[in-house]
Amino acid sequence: MILIEPFVFASAGAITLCVVYLASLFASNSRAVLDQPNDRSSHSNATPRIGGAAILAGWLAGVFVIAIFAEDADAAGKLGRLAICALLAFALGLADDRLTFSPVWKFAGQVVIAALFTTLFTPLQSAPLPFLGEVTMSPLWGIPITVVWIVGFMNAFNFMDGANGLAAGAAAVGLAWFAVMAGFAGAPALAVAALLLAIACAAFLPDNLVRGRLFMGDNGSMMLGFLIAAFAVLGAGWTGGRLSLLAAPVIFLPFLFDVALTLVSRALRKQNILEAHREHLYQLLLRLGASHASVAVIYMALISLCAAAAIFMLTFPAPLHWLAPLLLSCVFAIGAAAIYRKAAPAGLLARRDVEQDAPLSAAE
């Protein structure tokens, strides 16, 4: 078990904050990777989208300090292998930011990273199922399910990175809650890694949410999406199931629900689900007049609500764990219906017989 003195962790946290601040300052003045406004953008000026580098640099600096002073060499090695995978996820996102990969190539890269993770770490060995509880899985099932989960969440998190402060703010709040849960479940190394990443995301917010002069880009959203998904798998494995595999998905259910509902809604309206659009719930809120800050705060509050539900969920037997996401989804469906009732008359939802760009332009 990794043992960290409070002074060491405080130092790691301070270094993370400083590195993210300095890297964000440099990145916000960089013109290397710019996000040019288009008809789907919610910004009007070309903005650097290299913020993921600042978040990753701060997290790596903090993890490096922890690894140096860790009394458990095995735990330090695990953090190092996790950092390698995070670097690859960042590199894939950065390459996509610069070269704009096709969905096929991006998906292939994500699969490779997820497969590497299952090679460096133990894939899922069990999962909670409705009425059955914690069910043991063979590698034949554990490996593909692990890959699908990581790739799926990487894309879901990437889809939700479309408003200032939304992805970073939600990650900061959700990871802080997850760190507390991992610590109490007996995975201190994972708790430290998650909390340092939460600090890095929080330190990124001033330039992203407050000033709006730096985006995290695909380099940041893919890296964060990978790490959060990886934390879920590691949490279940490193605690012997005490930290349910559903803990992280429940915490980040507002993101998963938004993505799933949007895909289903577009499919029912005969829209191309692979085509870029502005019909996520958070995008509809923005187009209905909400500010970036208010949307980010709404999702951060929902993340906290779901984290509380996840903690409550862990007090119940494993066969009942699925009740948490089910009940939360029912609550979210009520809010989503209210948003759709306002968005449809305003022409914000594309129809089969109307070009997508027409209602977007009219709304603006």
Image: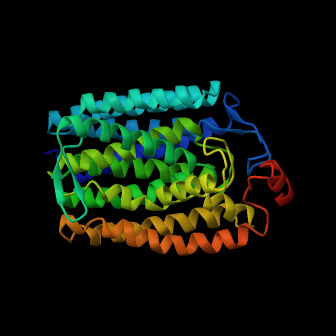
Q: Is residue 89 left or right of residue 247?
A: right
Where, by quadrant of the figure, is residue 140 drawn? top left
Is residue 118 something one can see in this rendering? yes
Number of marks in picture: 0
Residue drawn 77% across the image and 49% down it: 356
Please say which color scheme the image uses: rainbow
State the image coordinates of residue 68 (x, y, percent, origin top left).
25, 34
Q: Quadrant of the C terminus?
A: bottom right
State the image coordinates of residue 86 (x, y, percent, origin top left).
40, 34
Q: Nearer the viewer, residue 205 or 45?
A: 45
Residue drawn 75% across the image and 49% down it: 43
Query: Is 268 located above or below residue 27 in the figure?
Result: below
Q: Quadrant of the N terminus?
A: top left
Query: Is 312 located above or below residue 195 in the figure?
Result: below
Q: Is residue 151 left or right of residue 351?
A: left
Q: Nearer the viewer, residue 51 or 230?
A: 230
Residue drawn 17% across the image and 56% down it: 134
Q: Is residue 291 left or right of residue 138?
A: right
Is residue 11 something one can see in this rendering? no
Q: Outermost residue, right direction?
A: 362
Where, by quadrant of the figure, is residue 174 drawn? bottom left
Q: Is residue 5 left or right of residue 310?
A: left
Residue drawn 56% across the image and 56% down it: 264
Q: Nearer the viewer, residue 112 or 59?
A: 112
Where, by quadrant of the figure, is residue 227 drawn? top left
State the image coordinates of residue 39 (x, y, percent, origin top left).
79, 45
State the image coordinates of residue 14 (x, y, percent, origin top left).
40, 48
